[in-house]
Amino acid sequence: DSGVTQTPKHLITATGQRVTLRCSPRSGDLSVYWYQQSLDQGLQFLIQYYNGEERAKGNILERFSAQQFPDLHSELNLSSLELGDSALYFCASSPRPGVAEAFFGQGTRLTVV
Amino acid sequence: GESVGLHLPTLSVQEGDNSIINCAYSNSASDYFIWYKQESGKGPQFIIDIRSNMDKRQGQRVTVLLNKTVKHLSLQIAATQPGDSAVYFCAEQNSGGSNYKLTFGKGTLLTVNP
């Protein structure tokens, strides 16, 4: 157990809908990262937060947004969902930015039908 | 469990043999490299890392080799065990930049035959 908790584990939704994925980082970790893993693209960095503020942005679509709350949990919001958004979404946390030994959660499997 | 990828390079070894997994990285500015292991249905798990001022680092049963000249990274697993079966990813980072993202490779599926 990495100490990073993601909910839900599985999510099935229809195209055009909006979903929210939740991540609780390890106790004491201030930095949260979101990654998307699909069969054809591998692990893609989406966005990073540190202590509530956005620190880095990767290949995140405009339909997607994220935030980190004062209690350090983070949410990834995916809207106007398309079939191609079906993927595993991972959250990882580390004590501070730049620490590559990030600990990953078990992921949320999103299926858009 | 669920398959991580259907078109990954694969490596099949016998239990007890040594495994070598290779990775070519893309960014010559990357100065920090990490190997992750991902078992079916789980998130990536940190194995070992290496900074660009080193060319070799050893852990428990694992060794990472870095060749900056050809931008190549390898992970050696000694006495491979069935529990080592997983997808292995290399990741690179430019720790001097303001963007701390890790860029992952496509992964290699390691299968250990008993």
Image (cartoon, coloured by chain):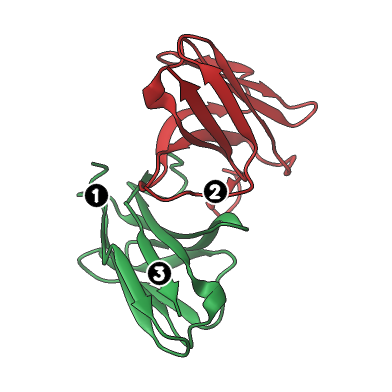
Chain colours: A green, B red
Q: Amino acid at mark 1?
A: Arg
Q: Are the numbered discs 1 and 3 placed on the same chain, yes or no?
A: yes
Chain bearing tag 3 is A
Task: Give the Cα distance between marks 2 and 1.
Answer: 19 Å
* Closest to the observer, A64 or B38: B38
User: Disc 2 versus disc 3: distance between alpha carbons?
Assistant: 22 Å
Q: Which residue is mark 3?
A: A110
- Whether callout 2 and callout 1 share a subunit is answered no
Q: Secondary structure at mark 3?
A: strand
> CA separation, marks 1 and 3?
23 Å
Q: Position of residue B32 (x, y in %)?
A: 58, 35
> Is A67 rendered above or below residue B113?
below
Which quadrant would residue B81 be assigned to in this image? top left
Residue A71 located left or right of residue B37: left
In the image, residue A64 lies at what x, y percent? 48, 78
Q: Residue placed at 40% from the left, 22% from the top?
A: B82
Please indicate whether residue B65 sits to the left or right of residue A64 in the image: right
Amino acid found under the numbered disc labelled 3 = Leu
Which quarter of the rendering shows the C terminus of chain A? Answer: bottom left
Q: Is residue A110 above or below residue A113?
A: above
